[in-house]
Image: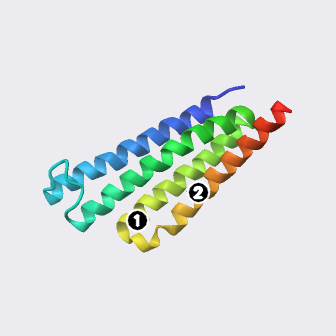
Amino acid sequence: MNFNLPALITVFTLILLLAVAFNVGRARGKYKIDAPATTGHPDFELAYRVQMNTVESSVAFIPALWLFSYYVSPVWGSVLGGLWLIGRIWYAIAYCADPKKRGGGFGLSLLVFVVLTIGALIAIIKQML
């Protein structure tokens, strides 16, 4: 099996993590919020929450991506991973614009995570039987 596509999705996920971290740093400077503070201007707090939510989601997504890619299909894992990335970018942009509008991006990324996880679980159990 060729795992170049899931590896590429993983690199894009790392770039997303870097981008949201950079956005928090930019907001710290703009609103003069020194580390380790995590509160202050509401726009800083939005950027910070996007970063933390993205980190939390990525911790679960990356193993789900790789397990699905290994046990089911690296191509389909990557297609789903691309949708997860679109969902997380949508989530980040919407959350910073208006937190009440983050649901679509959150829902897409959650749905993809569930499909990856359940798909991997089913494939692993099948292989064990």
Counting from the top left corner in percent of width and height, residue 81 is at: 60, 45
Given the image, on which type of amino acid does mark 1 rest? Tyr
Q: Is residue 115 left or right of residue 109?
A: right
> Hey, which residue is sitting farthest top in the picture?
1
Image quarter hosting the C terminus = top right
Residue at the spot 37% in from the left edge and 52% down from the top edge: 51
Residue at the spot 52% in from the left edge and 61% down from the top edge: 106
1 and 2 marks in contact (CB < 8 Å): no
Front one among 12 and 108: 108
Given the image, on which type of amino acid does mark 2 rest? Leu
In this figure, which residue is indicated by the disc labeled 1? Answer: 95
Image quarter hosting the N terminus = top right
In this figure, which residue is indicated by the disc labeled 2? Answer: 110
Closer to the N terminus: mark 1 or mark 2?
1
Vertical relation: 17 (above or below) 32 = above
- Residues under labels 1 and 2: Cα distance? 15 Å
Residue at the spot 14% in from the left edge and 51% down from the top edge: 34
